[in-house]
Amino acid sequence: MEGSSGRELSEEQLFRGYTGRLFLGISLGLCLLVFGRQLLPPLLPTIIADLSITPFQAGAAVTVLGATRAVNQYLGGRFADALSRKTVLVGSLLVLVVGFVLLSMAFAYTFFVFAVVIVGVGAGAYNVSTRTIAADLYVAKRGRAFGIQSALINIAGVGAAGGAALVLAVATWRSGFLPIAAMMLLVAVVFHFRQRGQYVVRRVELEITDTIRRLFGHEATRLVIIAIVLFTFAWQGMITFLPAFLQSERGFSPALASAGFGLIYVIGVGAAPVAGAVSDRFGKVQIAAGALLCAIGGITALLVANSTLLIGGSIVFLAIGFLSFSPVILAYLMDTFADGSMAGDLGATKSIYGVIGSLGPTYVGLIAGLWSYSVAFIGLIGCLVLSLLLVVAVEYTT
């Protein structure tokens, strides 16, 4: 496996040696990516007003970002398998630099959508590269490695909530994206000089049919993928419009709504690595089912909470569920994939659930425009219940 050459054979090191440095480096890049993407939800009310668009148009733009990101996860995965991890990693970072620069220049809706498409292209390829490299480096500690990555992502989410509030206090919503582009360019330069491996450029066969046959030919994998699709739909819809929900239906100020948004990631900093470590020991399917129960309970409580304290408690509960599920269930899937096709299989899986899941913001924006955010969130609870039933079914097929 590419990337494993740097790992000391006697130990999977999470923080030391070349392995640890590479793992933390790719995770830092992932933090920057997530910080940039998660600036959008708390900025959406301001973007809607500034660009004179509707909630549906805003949700559609976020869906375009998610769908583009999802499609390019398969392409990035196939390229990482057929070319090299370094080629895709550095190339995707450069695409992200361009995308965030364009976002800082978006003064019209069409240009805004074009910019998020470029970000989506880079995000998809980079995301699958980081997960694949982590899987290359760790086997026995795979759940912990994915949990640590998720914790760092959650730290980026916390920073995005605070960053959005700071940006709106001192400048326009566009001004937050240029510094991200500059830091990503720096990370790309560091990877160019420090990451082992070569750049490889050649024609790549996509092998879509073979990949789909591998994924859906196994019953447990098929059930897990459908469960992740439903989960992602609910997650994308909820997280994109949570600040808008808190402002319009709970009377929160923009700053307090951003704080509620950031609270999810504060909780995830601890919840994700703990869930990953526990799943390595007690079983990934069982922990994933428990996470979904927490998410269902958290959104349900959020819809009936009538005070700031109860709303905060509901957000804590749903955060534990939402941010514990992904690292655990992805580690389960990586355990089932063959080494030679791991990146492509992961990329295809992410493309499937990412494209369909990206419709979540469009759904919430549409239903909120017709009725309310609360009505839209009730539909998201239904998705999570179905996801839970499928995960439970996996336990009886293995």
Image (cartoon, rainbow, N blue to C red):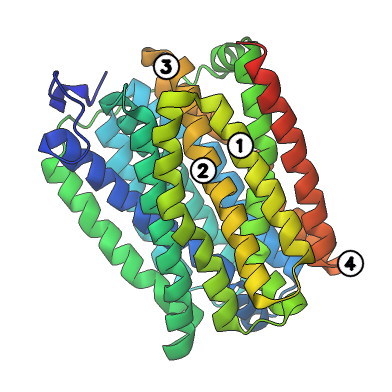
Tell me if label 1 and label 2 are in contact, CB under 8 Å: yes
Q: Amino acid at mark 2?
A: Ser
Left/right placement of residue 336 relative to residue 371 reads left
Tell me the CA gap for discs 1 and 4: 31 Å
Question: Which residue was labeled with disc 2?
Answer: 324
Tell me if label 1 and label 3 are in contact, CB under 8 Å: no
Tell me the CA gap for discs 1 and 2: 9 Å
Q: Is residue 120 visible?
A: yes
Question: Which residue was labeled with disc 3?
Answer: 341
Question: Which residue was labeled with disc 4?
Answer: 371
Q: Amino acid at mark 1?
A: Gly
**Dot 3: element:** helix
**Dot 4: element:** loop
Query: Quick one: label 4 or label 3, which is nearer the N terminus?
Result: 3
Residue at 67%, 41% in the rendered image? 293
Query: Quick one: label 4 or label 2, which is nearer the N terminus?
Result: 2
Tell me the CA gap for discs 1 and 3: 30 Å
Query: Quick one: label 1 or label 3, which is nearer the N terminus?
Result: 1
The location of residue 299, given as percent across then percent down, is: 71, 55
Tell me if label 1 and label 4 are in contact, CB under 8 Å: no
Q: Nearer the viewer, mark 1 or mark 2?
A: 1
The location of residue 191, given as percent across then percent down, is: 19, 45
Vertical relation: 202 (above or below) 106: above
Query: Quick one: label 1 or label 4, which is nearer the N terminus?
Result: 1
Residue, far right: 371
Tell me the CA gap for discs 4 and 2: 31 Å
Query: Quick one: label 2 or label 3, which is nearer the N terminus?
Result: 2
The location of residue 78, given as percent across then percent down, is: 43, 25
Q: Amino acid at mark 4?
A: Trp
